[in-house]
Amino acid sequence: MQPFDPARFAKRLTWGHGGRLGIAYHAHGPDWVELALPFSPDQVGDPARGTLASGPIVTLIDMATSLAIWTRRGAFLPHATLDLRVDHLRAAAPGRTVIGRGTCTRLTPSVAFVRGEAHDGDPADPVAHVAGTFMLMDAA
């Protein structure tokens, strides 16, 4: 079995929900993955301000944290989101791509723990923070 490669896997993000949103691979490390959500006028949640709706940002971070789990585990194994708390800190700037970074901070035999953030150009000024848990479906 080949080890999980998030860059290769992300090429498949052109279909489904992530594909509709335009989410694409950005970068990765041994336990983290970054995905990019390009600005799109049809994803604006506040037309008066031109800011993105929160739903696409939640999807971005959920996908980034999932890929971080597969990356850390080294394999595409089934898991399900148990809890994903997203704290929206501010609106993303209109017209900017949002980068979502997910990190798998701990693995137990049955649960993966994740953290993450989204920003629109400056990681020191995040749009949102996330913390969550995923149930590992292949656990005995």
Image (tube, helix red, strand yellow):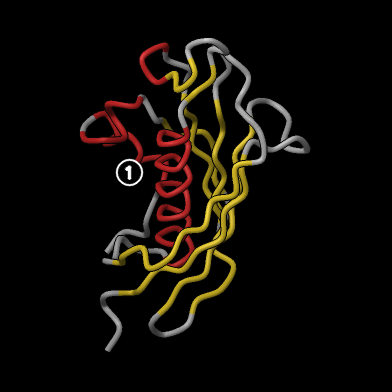
- The structure residue drawn at horizontal position 69% and vertical position 38%, both measured from the top left corner, is 126
How far across and down, in percent of the image, does residue 31 sit?
A: 55, 59
Residue at the farthest front position:
48
- The structure residue drawn at horizontal position 41% and vertical position 36%, both measured from the top left corner, is 55
Quarter of the figure with the N terminus = bottom left
Residue at the farthest left position:
16
How far across and down, in percent of the image, does residue 41 sit?
A: 42, 11
- 124 or 90, which lies in front? 90
- Count every numbered label the image shows and give the total: 1
- 107 or 51, which lies in front? 51
Element assignment for label 1:
helix
Residue at the farthest right position:
124
Residue 42 falls in which quadrant of the image? top left
How far across and down, in percent of the image, does residue 62 sit?
A: 42, 49
User: Which amino acid does the dot numbered 1 rest on?
Assistant: Phe
| Residue under pointer 1 | 9
10 Å crowding of disc 1: few (<14), some (14-19), many (20+) = few
Quarter of the figure with the C terminus = bottom left
- The structure residue drawn at horizontal position 53% and vertical position 12%, both measured from the top left corner, is 50
How far across and down, in percent of the image, does residue 121 sit?
A: 68, 25
Q: Is residue 122 above or below residue 48?
A: below
Residue at the farthest bottom position:
140
Q: Is residue 139 above or below residue 29?
A: below
Residue 73 falls in which quadrant of the image? bottom left
- The structure residue drawn at horizontal position 31% and vertical position 67%, both measured from the top left corner, is 79
